[in-house]
Image (cartoon, grey):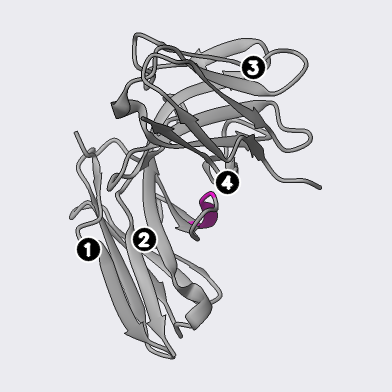
Amino acid sequence: DQQVKQNSPSLSVQEGRISILNCDYTNSMFDYFLWYKKYPAEGPTFLISISSIKDKNEDGRFTVFLNKSAKHLSLHIVPSQPGDSAVYFCAATQMNTGNQFYFGTGTSLTVIP
Amino acid sequence: NAGVMQNPRHLVRRRGQEARLRCSPMKGHSHVYWYRQLPEEGLKFMVYLQKENIIDESGMPKERFSAEFPKEGPSILRIQQVVRGDSAAYFCASSQVADHRDTQYFGPGTRLTVL
């Protein structure tokens, strides 16, 4: 029962261009969403988050957009850099009912120099 | 300030043996979470513990798996009588408080291989 889905297992982007990573969820009760970045042989590292009361959150080169009606969020990286090459996981949770994060299966981003 | 530490990084067990995975949270963190990542899948929540207490174990398999976080020492995830399907990467995360979802810091994981 995959409540958070990342349908693109991989994405390649030229350095300097925009990377757009997508994530869909099925549980309308989710009210907090996060993106994590993971390098090989390391644990995930928190990148950016968004509450359901917002539709956009920006932090430097990273922007997360939330479309609640479509149950869809996306992560935009502009401009993309080779060091951004990693696996990106989106995660969702319901803030007041426990501490489970539901993770997507990840998208492997390759930024080509 | 050391991050979340997990050991061993790699663990190989034969079917039927026991696996013990250790997690030392970041200094000052009293909340520990365990996740499992099966091949080609995302991380799946297993259990949430505070010192000496299991708060939420809804993601934990009902048999063979147990977790503890004693007053002193690391958190332990224990898998008894391992089977091949237990082969996965097990990640531990810790947080200082329980109500800020973006402050779970992850360890590097333990990769368990069951032969």
Label 1: element kind: loop
Quadrant of the image occupied by residue B9: top right
Residue highlighted by disc 1: A8
Q: Mark 2 or 1, which is nearer the eye?
A: 1
Residue at 27% across, 48% down: B40
Query: In this view of the protein, can residue A52 be seen by the observer?
Result: no
Q: State how far apart marks 3 and 1 are (Cα).
A: 37 Å
> Residue under circle 3?
B69
Pointers 4 and 3 within a single chain = yes
Q: Quadrant of residue B13?
A: top left
Pointer 4 and pointer 2 on the same chain: no
The residue type indicated by label 2 comes to: Asp
Q: Amino acid at mark 1?
A: Ser
Q: Is residue A94 above or below residue A41?
A: above
- Dot 3: element: loop
Q: Are marks 3 and 1 on the same chain?
A: no
Counting from the top left corner in percent of width and height, residue B57 is at 44, 16
Q: Where is mark 2, residue-wise?
A: A55
Could you tell me if residue B105 is visible in this image? yes
Q: Residue at x 36, y 19 (%)?
A: B15
Q: Which region of the structure is painted magenta?
A: A43-48
Say which chain tag 2 marks: A
Q: Amino acid at mark 4?
A: Pro
**Magenta stretch holds residue A46:** yes
Chain containing the residue with disc 4: B
Out of B111 and A111, give the one closest to the viewer. B111
Q: Residue at the spot x=57%, y=39% of the render?
A: B100
**Closer-to-camera residue (B83/B89):** B83
Residue B108 numbered tag: 4
Quadrant location of the N terminus of chain A?
Answer: top left
